[in-house]
Image: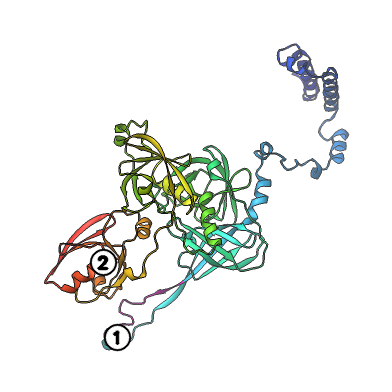
């Protein structure tokens, strides 16, 4: 049995012997290409370390001398100086970006009815005055990202929806009131402005078209209100749609842990640039399952530019066409290797698409050299291109593949005279209707050729409200007359009838009904 002390002393000598033997191996051939004195110097240093290690027992004077010569503060690893070194630690990256990620507190006052009959004069005449309705304050918590030093913050629309008071808290403890510059329910984005003196820390925008599946990313936010938290992961997928979180359908998918409270937080790349706004998770339990979704920064930048120019509504360019998903059967019939692209199902009589030569049955496969996987991807490309730009569309039509150029225009403005309050003794009395303009059809993703009028408002106590009509219902036909404009509807109702037979479109379904 070899004593422990002897074993410790013989181990370095065995290591030295192994190194000397290895010089004859193929591995040593690479080292021999170095200058002649390199090996000798290296062996000298190794020999010194071996001898030093053989005498430095735990608690010996040699060990104490080394410790006193190099305190713990001096031997700590320096911050990474390159991207490769940064992959070993995210600390410098977090220090540079985390101060620009803020907490967003949104409060609103709601009324709780003490009774469904409270405030009803008829009921209270017989049963006395009931307890008054009470008010309570509801709060929601999310995250946000400062993208301008004067205090412009990006967050999710659902974080500040219906809020009466919005406050932004920075990581250094400062807290400010803020106001809404722009909010878009369709894309689930909101732009805020801090009411306080800057400058504030910021994060620069990155280019989401440059990221690839597998890229390392960080998610920064305030999950569950526990405080600012950083999680790491990779880009799991791109151009995700049909995830059921909003009308928008071009998400970045990541496995970086995202939980409730992360909404509106930052998804950053390894260059410290903002590539997405975290917005949703796929979960049945309410916690992170490694499937999170972020809105691409290129779209966020377009919305921010609208807010900076004073716009209160972000408008996607108007193409004048309706698109559907390409099914495997359609792809096989057209000779496509896989089901991809956006199928043109309808083209408006007057619009950029018709002027460019698009026809029903064409398939849009590319937009400015970017592939179009589905109609939502085309909508994303339109939104990021902006009004006034020229777009090159790669189209597969009856004559084969071709490239057409489309000038992107703003949706035609709505005419305030197209809005009408319906009156008289009809089931529609009290409802506010308007013509189905290209702008409204585009927002609701309705076919461009659809002929109907849309119900904009329905007062609860009106006849229309009692008959169950809702905002967003489309009136397509009344008593056998096709309804394409509000004046046509007004004329039909003015004539009166002993019964009303009508057709409405609700959530894509046509409903026929008769009221006597």
Dot 2 falls on a residue whose secondary structure is loop
Q: Which mark is residue 74?
A: none
Q: Quadrant of residue 494?
A: bottom left
Q: Residue at x 36, y 60 (%)?
A: 440
Residue 224 sits above or below residue 39 on the image: below
Q: Quadrant of residue 101?
A: bottom right
Q: Quadrant of the N terminus?
A: top right
Residue 141, given in percent of the width and then of the height, sits at: 52, 61
**Residue 474 among magenta residues:** no
Comparing 213 with 411, the one in front is 411
Q: State the residue lying farthest toward the left.
A: 498
Dot 1 falls on a residue whose secondary structure is helix
- Mark 1 near mark 2, Cβ–Cβ under 8 Å? no
Comparing 392 with 459, the one in front is 392
Residue 424 sits above or below residue 470 on the image: below
Q: Residues within 10 Å of mark 2 (few under 14, many from 20)?
A: many
Residue 87 sits above or below residue 448 on the image: above
Q: Which residues are magenta?
A: 109-124
| Whether residue 47 is visible | yes
Q: Quadrant of the C terminus?
A: bottom left
User: Would you say 223 lies left or right of 69 here?
Assistant: left
Q: Quadrant of residue 65?
A: top right
Which residue position holds label 2? 469
Q: Which mark is residue 121?
A: 1
Comparing 349 with 304, the one in front is 349
Residue 86, given in percent of the width and then of the height, sits at: 67, 40
């Amino acid at each position: 049995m070899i004593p422990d002390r002897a074993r410790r002393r013989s181990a370095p000598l065995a290591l030295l012997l192994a190194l000397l033997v290895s010089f004859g191996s193929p591995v040593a051939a690479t080292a021999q290409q170095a200058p002649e004195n390199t090996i000798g110097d290296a062996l000298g240093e190794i020999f010194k370390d071996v001898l030093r290690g053989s005498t430095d027992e735990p608690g010996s004077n040699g060990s104490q001398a080394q410790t006193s010569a190099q305190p713990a503060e001096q031997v700590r690893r320096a911050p990474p100086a390159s991207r490769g070194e940064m992959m070993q630690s995210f600390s410098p990256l977090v220090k540079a970006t985390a101060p620009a990620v803020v907490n967003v507190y949104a409060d609103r006052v709601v009324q709780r009815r003490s009774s469904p009959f409270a405030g009803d004069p008829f009921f209270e005449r017989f049963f006395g005055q009931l307890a008054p309705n009470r008010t309570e304050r509801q709060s929601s918590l999310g995250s946000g990202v400062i993208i301008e030093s004067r205090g412009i913050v990006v967050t999710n629309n659902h974080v500040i929806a219906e809020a009466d008071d919005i406050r932004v808290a920075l990581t250094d403890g400062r807290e400010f009131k803020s106001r809404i510059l722009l909010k878009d329910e369709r894309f689930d984005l909101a732009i805020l402005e801090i009411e306080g003196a800057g400058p504030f820390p910021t994060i620069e925008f990155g280019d989401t078209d440059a990221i690839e599946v597998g890229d390392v990313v960080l998610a920064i936010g305030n999950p569950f209100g526990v405080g600012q938290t950083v999680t790491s992961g990779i880009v799991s997928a791109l151009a995700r749609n049909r995830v059921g979180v909003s009308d928008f359908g071009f998400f970045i998918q990541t496995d970086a842990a995202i939980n409730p409270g992360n909404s509106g937080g930052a998804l950053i790349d390894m260059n410290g640039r903002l590539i997405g706004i975290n917005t949703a998770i796929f979960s049945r339990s309410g916690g992170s399952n490694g499937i999170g979704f972020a809105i691409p920064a290129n779209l966020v930048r377009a919305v921010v530019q609208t807010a900076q120019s004073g716009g209160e509504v972000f408008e996607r360019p108007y193409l004048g066409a309706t698109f559907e998903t390409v099914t495997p059967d359609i792809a096989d019939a057209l000779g496509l290797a896989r089901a991809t692209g956006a199928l043109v199902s309808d083209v408006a009589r007057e619009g950029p698409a018709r002027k460019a030569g698009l026809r029903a049955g064409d398939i849009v496969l590319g937009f400015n050299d970017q592939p179009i996987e589905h109609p939502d991807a085309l909508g994303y490309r339109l939104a990021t291109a902006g009004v006034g730009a020229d777009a090159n569309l790669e189209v597969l039509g009856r004559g084969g593949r071709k490239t057409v150029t489309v000038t992107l225009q703003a949706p035609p403005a709505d005419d305030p005279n197209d809005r009408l309050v319906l009156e008289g003794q009809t089931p529609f009395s009290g409802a506010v209707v308007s013509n189905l303009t290209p702008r409204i059809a585009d927002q609701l993703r309705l076919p461009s050729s659809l002929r109907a009028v849309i119900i904009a408002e329905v007062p609860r106590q009106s006849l229309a409200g009692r008959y169950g009509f809702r905002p967003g219902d489309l009136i397509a036909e009344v008593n056998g007359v096709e309804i394409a404009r509000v004046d046509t509807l007004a004329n039909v109702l003015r004539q009166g009838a002993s019964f009303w037979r009508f057709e409405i479109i609700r959530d894509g379904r046509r409903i026929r009904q008769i009221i006597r």
